[in-house]
Amino acid sequence: MKRVFLETYGCQMNVADSELMAGVLERAGMELVPRPDEADAVILNTCAIREHAELRVLGRLGEFAHLKMKNPALVVGVAGCMAQHLRKKLLDTKRVLDLVVGPDGYRDLPNLLKSAAGAPVAEIRLDRDETYGDLEPKRVAGVRAWVTVQRGCDKFCTYCVVPYTRGRERSIPLADLVRQVEHAAARGFCEIVFLGQTVNSWKHDTNDFADLLRAANGVAGVKRIRFTSPHPSDMTDRVIAAMAECEKVMPHVHLPLQSGSDRVLDAMNRTYDMATFRDVVAKLRARVPKMALSTDVIVGFPGETEEEFEMTSAYLKEARFDSAFLFKYSARPDTKAFKWPETVTEDEKGRRLTRLIDEQMAISAEINDALLGAEVEVLVENVSHRDGTQLYGKSAEFKTVVFTDDGTQPGELARVKVVGTTPVTLLGESLKKPRQVPLVTIG
Ligand code: 5AD
Ligand code: SF4
């Protein structure tokens, strides 16, 4: 058991978990390979948030069944939320599978893989104490380091499977996190993104998320700090003040709304109402200059009436988010809402979704158009895949900016003038002055 192929589905938390697994495997002498047909073991790190995510993984497992026919020794594993969600059922029904490992079983992954080569293994215990805070992930090269600050979730939104797949909320100690940030910065990762299911509810001993932001702001070599995803109910004045006062914390917040109706928010157990949400948005915009906001919305939650849907649409127009992730409600086994009758048909969900997508695209396009002629600061990530003469990176507000290659290196900041826009990208021209060639007179 030497070569492992690891494929990631779902959210940033899974991307970070795959980096954690990669670190654990490499320290055990295993090697990560880029293709499944070169591997002794394949692991799919999966997502269970919507049914569609699970169907994609089941399709992929079908492909691995073919590979296993050619190479019967191949160990096939499923990790992550779907593993936890379907547990033994996966092993029983999917003959191709040798290993099912939930989000709290990664510390022992090398041994699990070795045992799975003999007989099928399921490691699906949730562990209230496991944070992996002491383990160094193998970070994918680039400018951005994902730093998991908290695992699990205690909010129990009635539609969401995460508290059941990732278990109770646990925060990683401040000292461990500061060490991880310093370590990442020393290796050239100049943007830190703190990750947690409700990242701003992070707390440890007497410290809260505001203290964590301030501590990271003081680490040399870090140029930018971001975090995702905060919960509106934990967006305290202390956190907003830290955002306003820490120059490295970027002016962008992904603040999931889910619905614009108080009744639906209550049925979702979101713990805030529209008055509170509006208040948080107003405070963020008042305290942090050029604050960019994005959000998540679910349409077709059980019982959502046409009128309640219109409230969501009206609020998106009022709030004018820079961008929004819009989803059709998907009933998830284990959740509270799963038992509630679905009152909105698939067709109607589709209609509501398309309406919001069209409306939000128009808003995003207007917001981006208003930036024409403005100067933005871009943290350069790389040369554009599409056009090798262009660089790309993110603005402070987390918008992707593509601009002419002016020799700025990945990890450096470039000043760029916006000369074109789409609803999702800014096109720019570098404002870097051409280097002055000194005049040398000879003779
Ligand atoms: N159906 C549809 N969307 C969901 N989300 C979470 N659970 C569900 C579900 N059962 C969405 C929420 C959340 C985002 C990550 O996924 O909007 O913020
Ligand atoms: Fe799911 Fe709600 Fe927790 Fe987010 S806050 S992970 S939506 S239960």
Image (spheres, rainbow, N blue to C red):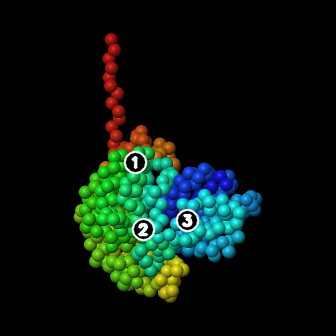
Place of residue 293 in the rendered image (x, y in percent of width and height, measured from the top left)? 34, 64
Which residue is at the front of the view, 301 or 207?
Answer: 207
Residue displayed at 33% across by 11% down: 443
Instruction: Please give the label number shown on residue 170.
Output: 2
Does residue 17 appear to the left or right of 279 in the view shown? Answer: right
Place of residue 411 in the rendered image (x, y in percent of width and height, measured from the top left)? 41, 45
Residue designated by label 1: 185
Give the SS element for disc 2.
strand
Among the 4 quarters of the image, the one containing residue 40? bottom right
Residue 92's place in the image compared with 111, above or below, is below
Q: Earlier in the sequence, mark 1 or mark 2?
A: 2
Residue designated by label 3: 105
Tell me the amino acid under the disc marked 1. Answer: Ala
Q: Is mark 2 within 8 Å of ligand 2?
A: no
Mark toward the viewer: 1 or 3: 3
Give the SS element for disc 3.
loop
Quadrant the N terminus occupies: bottom right
Neighbor class of circle 2 (other Cα within 10 Å; few <14, some 14-19, many 20+) is many
Asked if marks 3 and 2 touch (Cβ < 8 Å), the reply is no
Neighbor class of circle 3 (other Cα within 10 Å; few <14, some 14-19, many 20+) is many
Which residue is at the front of the view, 241 or 369?
Answer: 241
Tell me the amino acid under the disc marked 3. Answer: Gly
Place of residue 131 in the rendered image (x, y in percent of width and height, measured from the top left)? 46, 63
